[in-house]
């Protein structure tokens, strides 16, 4: 039964979930339809029953549980695939004769009983007498070499196995999204090079920094200062005379400001919204908000707002109006003397290998594109040694994480040397080789110890000056164009935390609204409290994770659907990930007309973007 992405998306739209699903999740749902021979309507009905009974959101992990635990029990025999009706396609002879790779493929279509047989067969395949067969499986990928001396074999460790799904893709090079005026612009450059620097050198992090030494009073002070700074910005923008005490009873309209909080553990909802005031205006008190009189709002924990309403009892603030927050001013456009030409960029986000192995063919294909198009700058965002990769998690690698990372950097440096292209490497908390589990995260350092006991510097491992390591987040200036970026998936974290009623903003969809939150809150990571896997040092956050200006371009890598949008004059881009699971993903190509940037009031109007399949 042929079920398209559009069929599934349309059925999800009926329940208001159409915007919550990305291409990777749609592909998994499509595979489920094919496996069980059901249509999109039956699939979505089963999902709604599953999600309601278990109270879970629509994400990749829950879809796998839905497929593994729910559907085999709930679907009748007539709804399942024809092969499930007849005799089992697995028996002792077929299992014993199957190779390990085949067992993995067959297992994805097996019933729970058959999977237990497969597990036993897999153990037999890996007994000592079959060690030679096991080693045959780990063969490097000998693809055609790229420009210079670069090849996938040199990039991937000896234990890398090529991903069949990635190598068999048929849509390589396909443009899946366009933004801006693409006519008259050539995506291929001439390797003219560029100058890369931090917007504010005082906010730079170093690999030697100390982190997570913050005291509770210092953290509280930083959080309080966030409220006061944003309140001052809102006061100036809307001409508010003064903010009142949010916990004092009042029969008249009063304007208050503070941080949105949740009154319980769990996701924010319209009955659990609290507003926490600053020390100066409200002595740090908090009060429950009644939002019933508002026709539209969009709130998330950590958001700082100003609102008008009444507080009859001193226990609940009835909100009549929420004042719209404002963006910071744009930076000055490039001057007349500063590279009055096009700036061509490429942006790619890890992981750079499929999730079932450490074959870096996707990265090698990307570098071939860099060699072909010769951009002025290429931004490569981690992870490079992904902690979510099953092979890396297995602990069976022959090399250390640092050696794998250093090998990638060395090959990238060699393959792009002489192109006139600067390579910006952005840190990621998902990188296994990095010891910094903190946000903001300092740039990577290549002065590392190797498994043989030696220690080598960047120059010794062959890294050229064309590779530039920057922190997460960072505000950079590239040929006069200000670019803000963060590798942490703040868009995904916001969409899991936000409540939104009514249409927010002129022509903004969910992705645009999430990106607008970041610009309006003047922070690369405005969510508070953060998820458990994001460890924020608020001393460092205060100096290195706040937006100094509204950048010309804002890079927001995410697992959500790739996009490029004009948000309040800023060109916001999610390039997608270079690989999504076992299949190839996307990267972004950007052209900025610096001449138009000087003359236009909207920097986004000077940008052209296309999202391309790797």
Image (cartoon, rainbow, N blue to C red):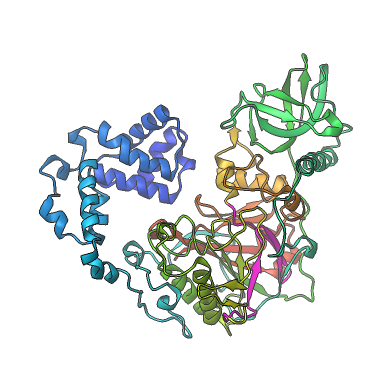
| 91 left or right of 604 in image | left
Height in image: 575 above or below 220? Answer: below
Residue 568 on image: x %, y %: 69, 50
Determine the residue positioned at 62% across, 77% down: 458
Residue 476 on image: x %, y %: 70, 64
Q: Residue furthest right?
A: 241
Taking depth in this image into account, of 454 and 420 the one nearest to the observer is 454
Instruction: State which quadrant residue 606 falls in.
Output: bottom right
Q: Is residue 564 magenta?
A: no
Height in image: 207 above or below 282? Answer: below
Q: Is residue 487 magenta?
A: yes
Residue 168 on image: x %, y %: 32, 65
**Quadrant holding the N terminus:** top left
| 266 left or right of 66 in image | right
Taking depth in this image into account, of 387 and 341 the one nearest to the observer is 387
| 614 left or right of 471 in image | left
Determine the residue positioned at 35% across, 44% down: 29
Taking depth in this image into account, of 118 and 422 the one nearest to the observer is 118
Specify whether residue 509 is in view.
Answer: no
| 175 left or right of 236 in image | left
Taking depth in this image into account, of 484 and 205 the one nearest to the observer is 205
Residue 282 on image: x %, y %: 83, 28
Instruction: State which quadrant residue 263 falls in.
Output: top right
Magenta residues, as a range?
461-488
Height in image: 324 above or below 551? Answer: above
Determine the residue positioned at 59% across, 34% down: 500
**Quadrant holding the C terminus:** bottom left
Height in image: 312 above or below 354? Answer: above
Specify whether residue 132 is in view.
Answer: yes
- Labels in figure, total: 0
Instruction: State which quadrant residue 418 falls in.
Output: bottom right
Determine the residue positioned at 83% across, 29% down: 283
């Amino acid at each position: 039964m042929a079920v398209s992405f559009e069929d599934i998306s349309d059925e999800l739209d009926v329940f208001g979930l159409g915007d919550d699903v990305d291409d990777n999740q749609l592909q998994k749902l499509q595979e489920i339809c094919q496996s069980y021979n059901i249509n999109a309507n039956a699939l979505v009905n089963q999902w709604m029953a599953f999600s309601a009974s278990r109270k879970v959101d629509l994400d990749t992990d829950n879809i796998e549980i839905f497929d593994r635990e729910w559907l085999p029990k709930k679907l009748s025999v007539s709804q399942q695939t024809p092969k499930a009706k007849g005799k089992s396609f697995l028996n002792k002879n077929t299992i014993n004769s199957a190779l390990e790779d085949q067992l993995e493929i067959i297992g994805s279509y097996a019933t729970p009983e058959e999977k237990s047989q497969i597990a036993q067969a897999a153990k037999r395949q890996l007994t000592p007498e079959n060690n030679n067969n096991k080693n045959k499986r780990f063969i490097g990928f000998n693809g055609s070499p790229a420009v210079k001396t670069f090849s996938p074999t040199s990039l991937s460790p000896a234990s890398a196995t090529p991903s069949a799904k990635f190598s068999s893709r048929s849509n390589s090079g396909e443009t899946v999204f366009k933004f801006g005026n693409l006519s008259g612009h050539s995506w291929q450059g001439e390797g003219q090079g560029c100058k890369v620097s931090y917007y504010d050198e005082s906010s730079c992090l170093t690999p030697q920094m100390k982190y997570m030494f913050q005291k509770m009073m210092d953290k509280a002070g930083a959080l309080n200062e966030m409220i006061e700074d944003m309140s001052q910005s809102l006061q100036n923008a809307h001409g508010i005379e003064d903010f009142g005490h949010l916990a004092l009873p009042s029969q008249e309209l009063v304007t208050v400001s503070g941080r949105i909080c949740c009154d319980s553990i769990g996701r924010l909802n319209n009955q659990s919204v609290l507003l926490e005031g600053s020390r100066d205006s409200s002595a740090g008190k908090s009060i429950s908000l009644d939002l019933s009189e508002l026709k539209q709002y969009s709130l998330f924990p950590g958001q700082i707002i100003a609102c008008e309403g009444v507080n009859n009892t001193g226990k609940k603030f009835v909100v009549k109006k929420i004042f719209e927050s404002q963006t910071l001013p744009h930076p000055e456009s490039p001057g007349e003397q500063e590279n009055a030409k096009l700036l061509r960029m490429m942006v790619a986000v890890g992981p750079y290998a499929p999730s079932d192995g450490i074959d870096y063919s996707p990265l090698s294909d990307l570098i071939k594109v860099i060699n072909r198009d010769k951009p002025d700058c290429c931004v490569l965002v981690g992870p490079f040694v992904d902690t979510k990769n099953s092979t890396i998690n297995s602990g069976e690698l022959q090399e250390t994480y640092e050696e794998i990372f250093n090998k990638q950097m060395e090959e990238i440096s060699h393959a792009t040397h002489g192109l006139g292209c600067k390579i910006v490497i952005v840190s990621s908390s998902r990188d296994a080789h990095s010891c910094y589990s903190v946000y903001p995260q300092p740039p990577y350092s290549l002065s590392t110890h190797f498994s043989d006991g030696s220690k080598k510097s960047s120059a010794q491992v062959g890294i050229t000056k064309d590779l530039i390591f920057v922190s997460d987040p960072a505000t950079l200036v590239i040929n006069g164009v200000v670019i803000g970026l963060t590798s942490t998936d703040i868009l995904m974290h916001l969409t899991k935390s936000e409540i939104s009623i009514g249409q927010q903003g002129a022509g903004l969809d969910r992705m645009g609204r999430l990106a607008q939150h970041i610009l309006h809150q003047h922070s690369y990571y405005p969510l508070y409290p953060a998820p458990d896997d994001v460890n924020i040092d608020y001393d460092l956050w205060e100096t290195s994770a706040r937006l100094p200006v509204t950048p010309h371009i804002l890079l927001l890598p995410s697992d959500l659907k790739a996009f490029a949008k004009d948000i309040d004059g800023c060109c916001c881009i999610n390039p997608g990930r270079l690989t999504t699971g076992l299949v190839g993903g996307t990267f972004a190509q950007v052209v900025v007309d610096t001449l138009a940037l000087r003359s236009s009031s909207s920097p986004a109007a000077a940008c052209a973007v296309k999202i391309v399949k790797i």
